[in-house]
Structure formats: C-alpha cells, structure tokens
Image (cartoon, helix red, strand yellow):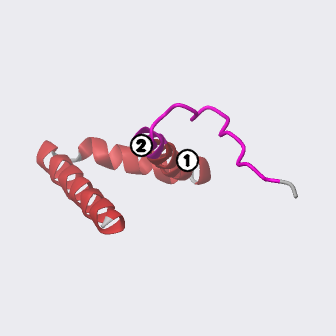
C-alpha cells in the first residue's frame, strides 16, 4: 500500500499569499488586454491615442470613473 502525498508548490508564487497572487494575475491579464490592440492593429491604436489626446480632461476623467466602477462591480459580483 503506497501513500501519496501532495507535492510542495514550486515556482515564483511560493510564499506569496493568495491575495497577492490574484493581484499579480489580474495585473498580467490587464497587460495582455492592453497590448492586444497595438499588436493587432497599430493604425487603429494610433488613431485612438490621437482621439484621446484631443479629448477634454472631464471626458477622460468621466470615462476613467465609469471603467473603474464597472471593474469594482464586476469584481464584487464575481467574488460574492
């Protein structure tokens, strides 16, 4: 009769608690998503950046708030 034991975790995340690991995974996913448009369509990305440069501060701030609120809401819904 052989007993099986779970192997010890290995890799970069050893020693990090679960919250920090989740935060780093979320950051990595954000970096992947942010890199998609410039990689797939540099011309459209350049046009979007130019349009953003012409936008007013209040429009950029409002858009940022809406995105943050949607993100917080999504995290809340997924974690509850």
As drawn, the label of residue 14 is: none
Instruction: Check the picture and name the quadrant holding the C terminus.
Output: bottom left
CA gap, disc 1 and disc 2: 28 Å
Along the polypeptide, which appears first: circle 1 or circle 2? 2
Residue 17 counted in the magenta span: yes
Residue 79 counted in the magenta span: no
- The residue carrying mark 1 is 42
Magenta segment, principal secondary structure? loop
Q: Nearer the viewer, residue 59 or 70?
A: 70
Q: Position of residue 30 (x, y in %)?
A: 45, 47
- The residue carrying mark 2 is 23
Instruction: Check the picture and name the quadrant holding the N terminus.
Output: bottom right
Q: Nearer the viewer, residue 68 or 25?
A: 25
Write down the quadrant of residue 77 in the picture: bottom left
Q: Which residues are magenta?
A: 3-24
Q: Position of residue 21 (x, y in %)?
A: 48, 41
Quick one: SS at disc 1? Answer: helix
Q: Residue furthest left?
A: 58
Image position of 75 (left or right of 61)? right
Q: Residue at x 16, y 52 (%)?
A: 59
Q: Position of residue 5 (x, y in %)?
A: 73, 48
* Mark 2 neighbour class, 10 Å CA radius: few under 14, some 14 to 19, many 20 or more: few
Q: Position of residue 43 (x, y in %)?
A: 53, 49
């Amino acid at each position: 009769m052989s007993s099986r034991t779970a192997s010890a975790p290995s890799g970069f995340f050893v020693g990090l608690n679960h919250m920090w690991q989740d935060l780093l995974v979320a950051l990595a996913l954000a970096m992947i998503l942010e890199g998609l448009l410039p990689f797939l369509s540099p011309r459209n990305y350049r046009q979007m950046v130019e349009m953003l440069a012409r936008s007013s501060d209040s429009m950029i701030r409002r858009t940022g708030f809406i995105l943050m609120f949607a993100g917080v809401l999504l995290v809340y819904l997924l974690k509850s």
